[in-house]
Image (cartoon, rainbow, N blue to C red):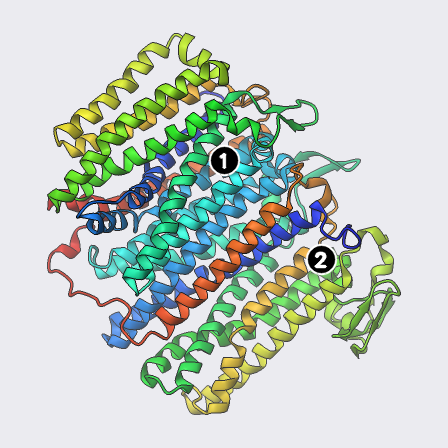
Amino acid sequence: MFERGLALSPLLYARAQMGLSLAFHIVFAAAGIALPLLMVIADALWMRTRDPEYRELRQRLAKGTSILFAVGAVSGTVLSFELGLLWPSFMGSFGSVIGLPFALEGFAFFTEAIFLGIYLYGRERVSERLHLFAGVVVAASGAASAFFVTLVNAFMNLPAGLQVEAGRVVAADPVAAMWSPSWMHQSVHVLLSSYQATAFAMVGIHAFLLLRGRRPSFHRKALGIALPLAIVTALVQPLSGDRSAKQIAHLQPLKLAAAEAHFETRSRAPLLVGGMVDVERGRVTGAIPVPGGLSFLAFGDVDAPVRGLDAFPREEWPPVAKVHLAFDTMVGAGTAMAALAALMAASWLRRRRWPEQRLMLWALVAAAPLGFVALEAGWLVTEWGRQPWLVRGVLKTEAAMTAFPYNAAPFWLFTVLYVFLAAIVGYLMWHQIVASREAVVPEAPRPAGAAHAAE
Amino acid sequence: MPPSEILLGLVIVAALVLYVALGGADFGGGVWDLLAFGPRRAAQRRAIERAIGPIWEANHVWLILVVVVLFTAFPRGFAAITTALHVPLTLFLIGVVLRGSAFTFRATDLNHDRGQARWGLAFSLASVVAPWLLGATVGAIASGGIRVDAQTGVVSGGFLAPWLGAFPVAVGFFCLSLCAFLAATYLTEESADSPAVQEDFRGRALAAGVAVGGCALAAFLAAGSGAPRIWEGLVHRPWALPFHAATAAAALGALRSLWRRQFRRARVLAGAQTGLILIGWATAQYPYLVVPDVTIWNVAAPARTRTLLLGALAAGIPVLVPSLWLLFRVFKAERQRT
């Protein structure tokens, strides 16, 4: 790889552009999956209780969804082109193999966009029930989209359905390719992470506004919707991660070795928490070792032998230090969220109400970014951990790169654009939706009769 | 049944027609936002915002469908296009991102007047640039300036020359004027509740319709040397004359309906004109995906993939069609009654 020396090689620029585009899109995609669910819950509660605070919550969530979905939709379009703009040989060889889930994702995206339009703009044009149904369709098709896209990533990590002879793909079965061995682990992990990240962000925001003493009744209702989702996902996600790690130990041992910075093959392998990775010397300094921890995590047996990086040719190693750091970040953030969730759940079971002590609320505020931190870090583990391969064992990232020689230009263009958009979205979300004192959309009374236009 | 290569080619053309007729009009709305003037400037912009708001994201998905079917069914064709046209496609994407985000920011920004100006400009400029780039991309694909080695798939012809010739530039303006024409025509119907605004858009639609004719003529003449195979197809094939006659009839019919203030009819005819233009181009270019080296036959995915893809598309349509029907019924049918 060109990580050193001429640090900004065309390959690095292409990877950086793809990484930037995905890192940006993934936040909006995750929020686009989870916010509609929270919005629909608020909507259903409004319909049941006729408590105007639930209606306001629904409006604010809808407004937020409209911004995040729009930016997610256009940044997703960028990605669908970038597959070809940056990795034309990948698409030339594998477009026909992975096209099926993308086509299904296209339809899911269609229904999501259509029903979001109806939900956001059609409140006065359709019946209340159809309106709620539109919200449900948005939430469901958002999840379906994420599921189909994750199938493609699962294929890249563990290609299935390929017949390879002498390093060349001679035949491919697109249906088998959709169901890579890791499809279930990855899609469950991705979907949970989307709900978890969004729920923790929303919980943190409303906890903060509660601390500021603004409209306690409203923000407690918002917490009441988001906190259960945050707790459930934070407690289930470590189990999903554990299942996934055990499978990776079997099927992608090199990725596991890199994630754990496990250099030497040995039994009773320790789990290294943190530490500085020295790839040249094959050492980790300053880590906290848990004896037998890695063996236990990978194979459920503290004495099991775990293959280290030394079992694989040096040129196949992913960037170990980065993968390890990303992995520790993900696990650390996940553990913190799980611990906090357990605390919140315990408190609720005892007192049947959500915590109001300032310390607890501050803890929730501090945890607000952790979900998205874990989500980005986890995605980096799987992408960096697969390098130098684009399709593991079949196509090297370098070999898939575009012949376009000026990759720096689009990289910087998109960097400037995305940094600018991120700042604007953050500003608008905070000032105009979250913290705005006025009702977001003053709702006109429903015109009698006109409501049934589309039933 | 025709071979699946042809069926999938037809799917791409159909999705492109819908993308231009629907999503293109959303870009056109941005053009008129930029060109809003006169005493009813604010009302024009409101009409545009109201017309685009609920539907632009759904309309945009047709483009995704084009891309996905292209790279699944004709993977090496997609690779050749994205390699040779890296520059205009990247700029087009930046336009797409800016247009969509700025439009949504504008609708969200509670400081409506200041936000309107700030985001409106980004939205409308991006709406002008993006359709031009899309047209130039199509022109480049048709021009024959992109060469692809049959054995290695290596693309030559340069990263600028193929889309900056007279022909692709003319096609770019053709596409831009068509989007503006469609938008203004649809907006006449959309602003039925305000006759003055409706008249504004009627005038714009008539002007844009004439511009479409001029750009079409320019592109046609430029094709003679700039895209010889397309010229050949447009002039010499047996269906050419009746086809041009039908397109011209739709175009003149749309203008006549606008003139007579039969706005619903104008909308239908403008849509038909768009479809005929794109189908005429696709037929003239058949069987080439990228003139002159890539055809739908020599880059087609394996037969099983093509069959599966057609199956997936067939499975998606029963979900898609009723959903789209509902969307357009909710937002576009009501005004006709009132």
Q: Residue at x 53, y 80 (%)?
A: A366
Question: Can residue A46 be spotted in the picture?
Answer: yes
Residue B293 lies, in percent from the top left, at 59, 20
Location of the N terminus of chain B by quadrant is: top left
Q: Quadrant of residue A89?
A: top right
Residue A295 in the figure: left or right of residue B225: right
- Which chain is home to disc 1? B
> In this view of the protein, which residue sits in the foreground, B8 or B158?
B158
Relative to B99, residue B247 above or below: above
- Which chain is home to disc 2? A
Q: Quadrant of residue A208?
A: bottom left
| Identity, as a three-letter code, of the amino acid under mark 1 | Val
Residue tagged by mark 2?
A385
Badge 2 and badge 1 in a common chain: no
What kind of element bears circle 2?
loop
Residue tagged by mark 1?
B69
Residue A400 lies, in percent from the top left, at 68, 40
Quick check: marks 2 and 1 in contact, CB under 8 Å?
no
Residue A396 lies, in percent from the top left, at 73, 44
Residue A133 in the figure: left or right of residue A374: left
**Residue A165 image label:** none
Q: Quadrant of residue B253?
A: top left
Q: Residues within 10 Å of mark 1 (few under 14, many from 20)?
A: many
Residue A8 lies, in percent from the top left, at 71, 51
